[in-house]
Image: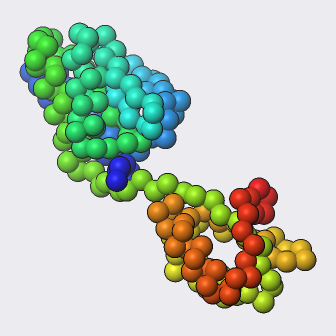
Amino acid sequence: MAQTLARAVHAELLVRKSQFIGCVQPMGDRAQALEVVQALRVAHPRATHVCWALLAGGESAAVDDGEPAGTAGLPMLAVLRKQELDQVLATVVRYFGGIKLGAGGLVRAYTETVARALAEADKVAIVSWQRLGCTLPYALEGILRHALEQEPVRNIRLAYGEHVRLALEVDASHANALRARLDDLAHGQLRWDDAGPGG
C-alpha cells in the first residue's frame, strides 16, 4: 500500500560551505507543489537554487533549477520512489558556498538532504475513499448511526424526507464489508444508490 507523510519535516546539510535546506511534505498535486516552490523562492530570495521533486498520483516532477542536469531533481525523486511514497513533495533550497561540488557531490548532497528529512518523517497509508449512499426508514437511523461510529467513515450526511437519506465516504478497502454489515443490521430495508444527500 502506498504511503504519504503525516506532516512536513525539515532537514539541513552543510557541504563545503554550501547550505542545503530540505523539506518533505504531503502534497496533493502539481498546482499545490508549484505554490509551495514559489513561496520558497519568496522566502529565500538570495538562494542560488530551489530544486524539487514531486510524486502525486500520475503527476511527477524533477526540477534542477539551474543545477547541472540530473544532479538535483532526479536524485531527490529517486529517494521518494525508493521509499514507495506518493503524494509527497521534496524541496531543497541551496545557498552556494563558493566551492563547486561537482556532479557527484551535488547528487550526494541533494540525496542526503531528502533522506535525512524522510528519516524523521511519519509515514501514513494513503486511504482511497469511496462514496456510498442509501435510503432507510426513520426507525433504523439510530441503529445505523451507532454502527457507523465503529467504522472507517467520514463526511456522514443525512437528509430527511419521506425516508432518511444517508451519504458517507468509506475507506474503499472496507466498502463491501460495511455495506454487508449495514444490510444485515437493517434486515434488507436499505435502498443503496450512488449519490445520497446533496449528490
Residue 182 or residue 87, whichever sits in front: 182
Q: Is residue 110 left or right of residue 105?
A: right
Residue 129 or residue 177, whichever sits in front: 177
Q: Is residue 104 left or right of residue 113?
A: left
- Residue 145 to residue 20: above or below: below
Query: Residue at the location (49% across, 41% down)?
Result: 28
Query: Residue at the location (20% across, 48% down)?
Result: 119
Residue 129 or residue 175, whichever sits in front: 175
Query: Residue at the location (29% across, 30% down)?
Result: 77
| Residue 105 position within the rendered picture, expressed as x and y whole percent measured from the top left | 10, 19
Residue 67 or residue 75, whichever sits in front: 75
| Residue 118 position within the rendered picture, expressed as x and y whole percent measured from the top left | 24, 45
| Residue 108 position within the rendered picture, expressed as x and y whole percent measured from the top left | 13, 26
In the current view of this chain or complex, which residue is farthest to the front?
Answer: 188
Does any portion of residue 186 appear in the rendered image?
yes
- Residue 28 to residue 167: above or below: above
| Quadrant assignment, res 181 | bottom right
Q: How many circles with numbers are drawn on the protein? A: 0
- Residue 106 to residue 89: above or below: above
Q: Is residue 196 left or right of residue 180?
A: right
